[in-house]
Every structure is written in C-alpha cells, then in structure tokens.
Image: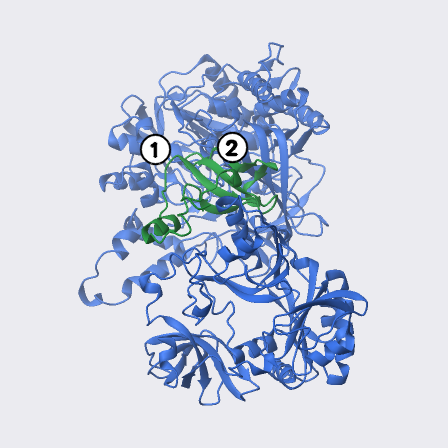
Amino acid sequence: MLIPCPHCGPRDVQEFSYQGDATRKRPDPASTDVHAWHAYVYDRPNPAGPHREYWQHIGGCRAHIVVERDTLSHEVLGAAFASDLSNQGGTRP
Amino acid sequence: MSPRRAASTGLVDRSQALRFTFDGRTYSGHPGDTLASALLANGITLVGRSFKYHRPRGIFTAGVDEPNALVTVLSGDGREPNIPATQIELYEGLEVESQNRFPSLEYDLGALGQLAGPLLSAGFYYKTFMGPVFGPLKGTRFWMICEHAIRRAAGLGRAGYEKDPARYEEMNAFCDVLVVGAGPAGLMAAEAAAKAGRRVILAEQEPKAGGSALWSGEMIGTRPAHQWAQAMAEKLAATENVRFLPRTTVWGYYDGNTLAALERVADRPSGTAKGLPRLRLWNIRAGKVVLATGSLERPVVFPGNDRPGVMLAGAAERYARQYGVLPGERIAVFTNNDGAYRAAAALRKAGAGVVAIVDVRPEISDAARALAQEAGVEPLLGHAVTGTAGKRLTRITIQRFDAATGRVSGDGRPVDVDCLAVSGGWSPTIHLASQAGGKPVWDEALHAFLPPSPMQPWVGAGAFAGAKTTVEALSTGRDAGLAAAGKKPSRARLPAVTAPALDPAPAPVLEIKAAGKAFVDLQNDVTAEDVRLAHREGFISVEHLKRYTTLGMATDQGKTSNLPGLAIMADARGLPIPEVGTTRFRPPFSPVSIGALAADRHRHFKPDRLTPMHDWHVGHGARMMEAGLWHRPMIYGQPGETVEQAYIREAAAVRRSVGICDVSTLGKIAVKGPDAAEFLDRVYTNTFSTLPIGKARYGLMLREDGIVLDDGTTWRLGAHDFLMTTTTANAGKVMQHLEYFLDAVWPHLKVHVTSVTDQWAGAAVAGPDARRVLEACVTGTGVDNVALPFMGIVHGRIAGAPVMICRLSFSGELAYEVYCGAGHGAHVWEALMDAGEPFAITPYGMEALGALRIEKGHVTGAEIDGRTTARDLYLDGMLSKKKPFIGSALMDRESLIDKNRLRLVGIVSLDGQPLGGGAHVVEKGSLDELGASIGHITAACYSPALERHIGLALVKGGKSRHGTRAFVSDPLRKRFGPVEIVSHHFYDPEGRRMHG
C-alpha cells in the first residue's frame, strides 16, 4: 500500500506507523464526563468502506497524517496533515 | 543415448552430459533438461507415491502445475522436500530421492493402506475424531493414537534438520510496465512497451523465454516459433529500458500494483555460484501490469487416471518437442478437444508409436483429422477411456461414450499402451488476476473461467485473456503492451503464423463416470466420489468442498484439479459450472521457500546502537548485553568472577565509595517553544511550569486510559527550553506520544520536540565520593551543595569539554549525571575515571544498576508494565489535583482504584535462596501443589547492602500486606520458599544519602 504523505509524496506503508482511528474527538481537557472519555479512548467504528485513520510517517517527516482509506479495497481516497484538523473538542483549546 | 531420447527433436544440448542420481542410482541427461524430462528419457515413469493411498504415481505435467512428481532435493546434509521434478533444472551432481514410500518406491508397505481405501473417504478425520467413541474404548485416547499413526502414513516429503547454508536476498524494483510471462503475447507486450520508452520488467518462470512457442511446433514469420521467441528475448534483454528476469515466478499480486516474485538465481549447491544468492525475492512496484500468463491444461477424470504413464497431452507434446523425449513407446491419446491431435502428431514425428486417439466428441475439425493422419491413426470418435491397468500403465480400456448424455455403453476394448496423453481443454492462468480482485468470468465456448475485469491497473494478453490462437496472442500482446504504455492499439502488420486451424472449443466433458477410483486432485488423493460424497453431506459450496475434501489444497493448489472438481460438483447439483462458482486464488501462485521470505533484510535497517563509550567498555572487560537496539555493559567482569559476584562487587563499590555508569542510552527529547511549559503540564501528571530554570524534576506520564506510560526527569534549561529524559526502552514510544498530541490534538501549541538521544553522552557518577570526583575534574563551576543542590543543574567543563551536570540519583547515593556532546563522550568518561582513581572509582553495568534500584524501590519497565496505575506504584503524590493532564479523566475509574489491585511491595527471601523475576507469590502451597497467586515478582537480586535476596513484586492489596509472610512459587525453576512482604523502600527510605 502506498500512502501519499502530503510532505514527502507517495511512500510505502512500511515507513508509517498506524496510530488508529482519526474520527475520534478528544473531549475538553477539563471535562469529567467519563462516558465521553471512554468513547474517545475505546469506542471505535469498524466501517466497511471509507474510513479516516492516523498514520505517522515515522520513516520520513514524522508528521501525523489523516488518511482516508476504503477498508474494502484499501484504496486511499485522500491524505492531509493531522495538524490542520485538530481533534480537540470543547471550548478550551 | 537414452532409450527414450528422440532421434532429432528437442532444444536440449546433446553435446554435454549431466549426471544425476535418483534414489541412489546414477543417470544422465543434458543441459536444458528438467529432472522430469531426464527421468522420462531414462525410461523412469514411476517417481512417487501418493499422499493418502500410497498409489504409484508418475510425471503428469511438464510445468508448474505438476501434482504428482514431487521429490526431495538433497545437498550435503540439507534436504528440500516436495519440489516438482518438472521445475528442477538438471545440473551436474543433482541428487534427489522419491517421497512417501517405505521401504522403497517400488515396494511400498504404505500401499497396503489402499485396502482401507473406502474408510479414508472425504471427511474421515472429522467423522472419526470429532465424533463420540463407544464401547470399551470409550474415554480412552484411542483415536488420538490412531490419528498419530494415520498422519504419519499420509504425507509428503520430510524436511531436514540441518541449518540451510544457502543465502537469500530481497530486492525492491520499480517499473512502468511489468510483463508477467514471456510467451508470444508477453514478448510482444514487452517489446511494444519498451519501444514506447517505458521501463519494463519481463518476468518468466521458466529458464527460457517462449512459453508455448518452445513446443507448439508452429512457425512465426519465417522461423520456427522457438527461434522467433529466442531472438525476441535476446533483443529485449539487450534493450536498455528492459530488465528480463528468467526463472522468475510472479507469485503474488497485492494492493497498489505491488507484485511479489521469486527468482531462482542459483538454485543449486553453493560453490557453482559463488556470491550469488540461491533465491531472490522481488517486490515489484509496477505502474501497469501486463498479465500474459497463458493457460494450463486440465485433465479428463476417469477411473485409473492416476497411473504412472498417464499425463497431460500438452505435457507429452512438450516432452517430445522441447526436450526430445518420448514419454512412452506405445502412446494413446484421450481428448475432448482438437489440441491433443497436435500432440499426437508431434509424438509420432519424434518417433513414438501412436496406437489410438480416443475422442469423446462425435465430430472433429478437418485440421484435427489431418493431424490424426500425420499421427498415423484413425481417431475413435464418441469413445472414452474407462479404465487402466498396471503399476506402470500397461493397458487402457476403451468404451463407447455419448457426450450428450455422459453415458458409457458397450463392451470395454483393451488396448496395450505405456503412455496415455489426456486433454480436457485449457484454462487461462487467472491466478494473479484473481488475487488482484474481482470475480472470474465463465466462457462457455472455452469451457473455462476467464480473468475478471481489472480491479487494479493490469491489462491481459494472450491465452490468459482468452486468445485462442498464436496470431491472437501476438496481437493482444502488442496491444496490451501499448495500452500499458498509454498508447493506442497498432495497425502495423504482425508476423505471420503457420499453424493448423484447430477448433479451440472443447466438448463440455471433464469426467467419465465408470467403476473404479477416478482422481480429481492427484496430489491430495481426492476422488470424484469424494466430491459427490461432499455434495451428499451438504458441503456444496466450493469453499466447503475445498475444506471438506482438501481438493485444491496441496502444494500445486489445484492447478489441474480446480475445474474438473467444479464440473463434478456442478453435475451433482444439476447446475451450470459458473453458478457453482470458483474459490478466490490467493498468493502464492506456486510454493515459495521460507528462506526467501525470511531473506536477509539487514534487520529491517535497525542499527546496532552503540554509546560513545562503547569501545572503552569492551576494552575494560565489559560483558555487553542488548537492551532494545542498544548495547550496554551488563557487568565489567574480572578474571574468575561470576556475573553475580561482579555485580555485587560493583554495587557495593557505589555504596562504599563511588561508581560510574554509562547512561547515554536514556531517551532525551528537547522540548522547546513558548508553550513548552504548558505542554509539559498537560503531558506530565505533575507540574513543570513552576520549575525554576536550572532545576530538574522527576515526572510521571500516563496514557489516555490512566495507566502509567513512562517516568523520567525533565530539566529546565531556559524559559522555553526543556530537556526531557525517558527510560531507555520507552524513548521511541514517548516521542510518538508527544508528537501525536502536538500534531493531532494541540497543533496550536507553539512547541517543538526533537529527539536528541544520540546527541548527548551521559555518565552517572554515584556514591559517597561522587562529589570529590567532580571537584577533582570539573572547572568553571562549583559542585558543592550550594552551587549544585539536589536536582540542580550546572554548566562547566571537564578536561576542556563543555559539560552539563545534574544532581540526581537513581541509586539512592549522592549522585550526578554528567552530560556532554556525544563526540566528547569517551574523552569526558576517561577524565572522570582519572579523577576517580584516588577513590577507586568502579564502572558498573546494568546488573549493578538493577540491584541498586531494587534496593531503593525505584520502578522501571518491569513495574511500569502497561497495567499499573500511579496508585499501584504508590506514586499518587505525583498526581496534580490542580490541572487536567493526559490520563487524569480516566485514572480514577472504579476498577483502577480498587484496594485489592496488584500494588508494589518489597519481598525478602527468608530461606536465603534467590528469588526469580516472574515467580508467583502465593499464600500457601508447595513445590508440587500450586497455590492461588496473589501477585508476582517483577525484579529480584542479591542486595549487597542488606546481604539478602530481595525483590520487587506486584501483590494484591500492596501495602496492607507489609510484614506478612507468603511464599514464592516458581514451578518452572523448581523453587518454592518462604518470603516476607515488606516496603519496597529497602534502603535508606528517608533518602538521607542522596541529599547529603
């Protein structure tokens, strides 16, 4: 599988480290809502089809990349820097 | 001349003889032979015993599809089993033996098992071993013993125990166009793509390019087809943008147009190929792929179709034309299509007697009739072979056959033959296309599955794509090459092909139903009756059929049995074949040696990490150990010392005077930026924004789920400048953790993290005399208690080199960590050794470091094991209540604050015997009787300070058990003994020594 790193270009999947679901939203740091935290840490959808995932380019620029990938065909539909798409929820940044 | 070598035909080099041995007897062949062709040339037709019934078996094909003729190749002490004789290029001194026979191939006791044949039908194992056992054997292990014996009787070759001396290699390659298969279509495709300027890889599994051109007997242009192919291959090999890889099987088609191939570089004893690997594994990334993998002939299934001497018609033709070998002297042909007539003519021309052509069809084409005439026989139309005889084939039985009803009628007519060439038509080799995704498409005319429409960028050509003639192969090949190069099809003239105008469509007959065992899968001994049994018992889906009968699961993966098996199931279900479906092909296309898959990958480019002081350690008697990628001193052994004696001496020296330890391996991360302090407050459980410049603080990190991630000290070097240290083992993990939060969660924080582990060398100087050592060598700064208090940081020089010194202690003694640029590491280390000489400074290794930390009750990776919380480790004091931090939201969940969790304690051995890491702690029991575990020992040592065997442990309830007795239970190491549970702060619990 090739992952199109927005910084380094298309690279082999072996250069990347899978960092999990990128659709999760981190609750406000001050939040004490255990259910929201639980959902963020543990609950993972397992879609058959397009999915967004974090891949870190550990063998390259080390950036975390949000990759949209079809889990059925492994086709990569898009890739963007995670830093452009903060997953921090809540009001306090 | 061998008895079966044809007078004039063949492409082998007869000027040279090669000797080889088969089951200990020496024979001879020629360069260009395979083992199979050489055996046949020597009149050997019995080459193996079958998997289940030990039936005598011969050579069935001439290529990669061989199910029967599996042999073990011997080289020195090594043995490689289950190699098809058709895939072994003959070489001088080749030694092989036959398989699955005892005491000999000729007289095999296992064949008696045939008498039990009816018992060993499909599903035998499931029915027998999964079902209940009745009678006197009830409740015994009877069936398990039977199973053992049965599994021994069945089988293939035996693997060796010797280390494989061969070398294997892995190669990555890139190309615009990968052409798989160098037959007429593949050669045309490669030429067209190369002419368009594309970088081309042309892979061919056989040693020679040409495919069917090597044995079709056709003319391409003005030359015999094999000469045309050779000229094309030579031209392509000499083209700059073409890489021609003969002996290379493309065996896997993966995502992103990545294909795996296996090249047999020097697949023979080392010595003949100095420096070359035996096999080379290729990972090929192709822009486009041209699949020109041709087609594979399938047999007709009939009773007795497995006897040595029965082979595919195309194979017989190939032996005659390519190898100049006669597979028999009295040959009959049995077919449902025109193709076998060409084989009959070829065999006759090579000098064999063709005694009969048996055809299930009532009518044949004129071209076929003409070929029959060339072969010198009148074809028996509307007939079928219904039986065979002989250990080696001696006779066949022929009966009338109605292709429309599938019925056999009339009396059997015996014909004496020593070879029967069978053809059931041809199936495109769609394996790679199927791996790439998509469902194969049924073609009624060819009575075969065609490749699916592409799910990945590949183009099909030749027989693979359903081409019926060589002319079509040439044109589809060229167009495929052009298409792969992004060009339009060409209208330029193709070379003319001279070939008989055969009808490509076979009669839809793949099985003759008559009495006797008729084999579908020759390698796994699956019969037509087994397929019907599976149907009767409800295993009607192809996937169930495969698993229930093992049809198509052998090393040949059903290359000859796939379609006949489907046809029989379709017949049983009363459905057309495409409605029964086909299994999806999976990699590998043909077997791949494990050695090649495990090819030397240079440890995946993982380095051996050596500290700047490495050579010093080795030069001073250090015994090194690997800690992750790092090499660290375990002990600095003195002559005659054991490991235990060495670490006790080293640890005692630290407590008594002073020791020095290389801590360069600690993870070091520079955390810089205006928001660095804020970031650390979020990352650590305790507060760092209040840390003064020039001071260090011990910090604890949790994961998001509230479990401890790592600990270490972080030093504030400036307002926006921190140096974080991590444990050696977790350096990479912590770095990723920080990067995740900075990238994905808080990208707005103005912080940058950089791993600087390799930039700094570090030495810990520890012991009551540590300050005196520094006083003797540090310039530019004071190191007294005022200038350098506990957790203070100063900058100075040692022997001219700039150093940064932090006063912190892992050992519990007065201690300092001295850091300098990695390039000065050895220099500063030696200066510290010189300065420490008056105090008998002692270098200490990992073992002593471990003993010192256990005495102090400091936690490390053994306790921070991914399951423990801060409370479990009695580090609750570090959990800030004033701010949220990573893990703070989930760390107080009910089960994480349970009082009865495994929590940190100290353990003291009461019987003077050592404790072992991993041993359980129990309240009662004995060496033989296991008690219920209340926890386990995480680390243990002999404590020189306490003069006892001690350890750290995680025990239910932790502190509440202090002062109680328990036992260590370590059945693997035969250790059981009394212990006392105590505080994990064994030594100087108030910390007076390190603050002193």
Mark 2 belongs to chain:
B
Q: Name the residue: 72% across, 37% down.
A: B15
Quadrant showing the C terminus of chain B: bottom right
Query: In terms of depth relative to the viewer, which is nearer, B965 or B386?
Result: B965
Is B363 situated left or right of B419 in this image?
left
Location of residue B131 (image quadrant): bottom left
Chain B colour? blue
Residue B648: x %, y % from top left: 61, 84
Judged from this view, the residue extending furthest toward the left is B135
When the figure is inspected, residue B84 is found, relative to residue B241, above or below; the finding is below
**Residue B315 badge:** 2
Which of the two marks, 2 or 1, is nearer to us in this view?
1
Q: Please state, as top left, top right, bottom left or bottom right, where the N terminus of chain B lies in the image.
A: top right
Residue placed most toward the observer, B89 or B771: B771
Q: Nearer the viewer, residue B288 or A13?
A: A13
Chain shown in green? A
Disc 2: CA contacts within 10 A as few (<14), some (14-19) or many (>=20): many
